[in-house]
Image (cartoon, grey):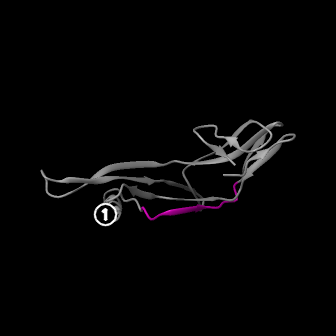
Amino acid sequence: MSPVVCAVGDMDISVSSGYSVANTVGGSAGVDLTFVKDKLAGSLGINYSRTWTTQTSVITKATIKDGQCGVMITKPLTTRRSGRQFRGCIGSATEVGTWYADSRGEGSYNGITWIEGAISACAKPGSNPPLSRCNGQGNFR
């Protein structure tokens, strides 16, 4: 993501550095996350210790019009899996808690790799930060 810019006259913003994102596993208290991570890795072939740091020479540019504030947004594609963990024997097992696991894919071309997803701009009328999000709750600062 880029910093919020507020334009006096049209202003170009771009993203040329990168970002870091990781596959994750989480859950409620009592869940054995190592067990969940290992089972998912074995059955789905997904490395939940994987982290991407994307740095390329590709520049994505957007123009923020006069009188607007804007920000560049990265939106990696994420697949979320979730479930419940039980302890005990079949028929008398008790639920320990719930878990989730997020994973991302990657693309590549000619030796350059990147995380799958999109880069877009969010722009709205304004003269000072914060900028309210274009989708969802909260603000960019």
Q: Is residue 80 left or right of residue 70?
A: left
Callout 1: few (<14), some (14-19), or many (20+) C-alpha neighbours within 10 Å? few
79 vs 139, nearest the viewer = 139
Per the rendered image, the range of residues in magenta is 48-58
Q: Quadrant of residue 86?
A: bottom left
Task: Report the residue that reaches farthest toward the left.
Answer: 91
Task: Report the residue that reaches farthest toward the front.
Answer: 29
**Residue 62 magenta-highlighted:** no
Q: Position of residue 111 (x, y in %)?
A: 59, 62
Q: Residue at x 44, y 65 (%)?
A: 49
In terms of secondary structure, where does tag 1 sit? helix
81 vs 110, nearest the viewer = 81
Task: Report the residue that reaches farthest toward the top.
Answer: 125
Q: Is residue 25 left or right of residue 88?
A: right
Identify which amino acid the numbered label 1 is placed on. Answer: Phe
**Image height check: is 74 above or below 48?**
above
**Image height check: is 54 above or below 1?**
below
Q: Residue at x 44, y 53 (%)?
A: 102
Residue occupied by mark 1: 35
Q: Position of residue 137 (x, y in %)?
A: 58, 39
Q: Residue at x 17, y 58 (%)?
A: 88
118 vs 72, nearest the viewer = 72
Q: Position of residue 40 (x, y in %)?
A: 34, 58
Q: Quadrant of residue 114?
A: bottom right
Name the dominant secondary structure of the magenta segment: loop
